Image: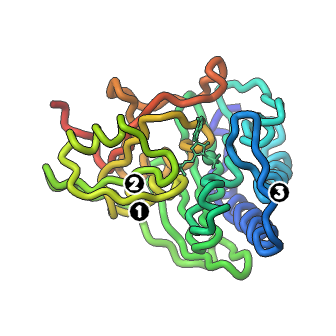
Amino acid sequence: MTSADIDFDALAAMLAETAQRAGQAIRKIYAGGLQVREKADASPVTDADEAAEKIILADLARVAPNVPVIAEEAVASGSVPATDDVFFLVDPLDGTKEFVRGTGEFTVNIALVHGDIPRFGLILAPALGELFLTIAEDRAVRAEVGTDTVKPLDSVSHEPLQTRDPAPGRLVALASRSHMNETTERFLETHGVTETFQAGSSLKFCRIAQGLADVYPRLGPTCEWDTAAGDAILRAAGGVVLTEDGTPLRYGKAEDGYRNPGFIAWGRQPVQE
Ligand SMILES: Nc1ncnc2c1ncn2[C@@H]1O[C@H](COP(=O)(O)O)[C@@H](OP(=O)(O)O)[C@H]1O
Ligand SMILES: [Mg+2]
């Protein structure tokens, strides 16, 4: 199968509802009180992560039964299917730490990779009622779906996502709330960043795609399911995600356990110094 065989409109319409159902499951579990456990890598996991992933995997198995899915909680329990040129990446609850803290900055993430590039991306922030997704290779949108009911994609209005032109020497950056480090602080000091906001989860990619900030340095570990949907959305809105050597972040790194190197997400391709 290639990405040319996939009907992107149908995928977007279906997964927009899948993600909202996953979001409702997350919110229901949250309202009932959270049991937080630790995974083998010491990161937190809750029943909400697992419930949301189950909903997403069931729908993907129906719509694209032959496409492998690399999903965060399945990988944590040792289930890592072989991938080929086309595969899905799923992070059912990105920003689990933020979720546990109650900040609302957590997301449901679904992406389709083809040929080491994320071509389709969908991010839902269930507590904020905001949905971001690619609707074509070079078009991404934001829709307000609210938090009460599952809304079909064609029943809500969309606003196009477009990154902004940075003001040289006055960049606005986004950085992780939970995973700040010295390398990131050094990057901020040396790249003309005059303002930094901290935020959780893949929403950082979305805020750059909206033109609300210029750069998101992530110079510490993440996994491909944390970044693929945000990368696809940011690309379609005019941005790029580059590794520290200036090349685009690549996907399908099975031999590295789908772990990413450090990267920098930019609203616009940076001018080479
Ligand atoms: N040591 C590590 N190795 C791999 N990924 C890590 C990591 N520390 C943090 N992350 C990733 O960073 C994500 C959180 O990003 P942020 O701090 O920007 O909210 C986590 O997503 P999950 O919450 O889905 O586990 C986790 O996957
Ligand atoms: Mg994550």
Secondary structure under tag 3 reads helix
* Mark earlier in primary sequence (2, 3): 3
The N terminus: image quadrant: top right
Q: Where in the figure is residue 167, as x and y percent of width and height? A: 16, 55
N-terminal of the pair, mark 2 or mark 1, is 1
What secondary structure is found at the residue carrying circle 2? loop
**First in residue order: circle 1 vs circle 3:** 3
Task: Provide the residue designation for mark 3.
Answer: 47
Q: CA distance from mark 1 to mark 3?
A: 33 Å
Q: Which mark is residue 8?
A: none
Q: Name the residue at 77% across, 55% down.
A: 36
- Residue 237's label in the rendered image is 2
Residue at horizontal 78 percent and vertical 44 percent from the top: 64
Kindly report the distance in space between the C-alpha atoms of the residues bearing marks 2 and 3: 33 Å
Dot 1 corresponds to which residue? Answer: 161
Q: Quadrant of residue 34?
A: bottom right
Could you give the CA–CA distance between mark 2 and mark 1, rounded to whole angstroms? Answer: 5 Å
Q: Amino acid at mark 1?
A: Leu
Which residue is at the far top? 255
- 220 or 259, nearer to the observer: 220
Q: Are marks 2 and 1 in contact (CB under 8 Å)?
A: yes
At numbered mark 1, what does the secondary structure look like: helix, strand or loop? loop
- For residue 12, which quarter of the picture? bottom right
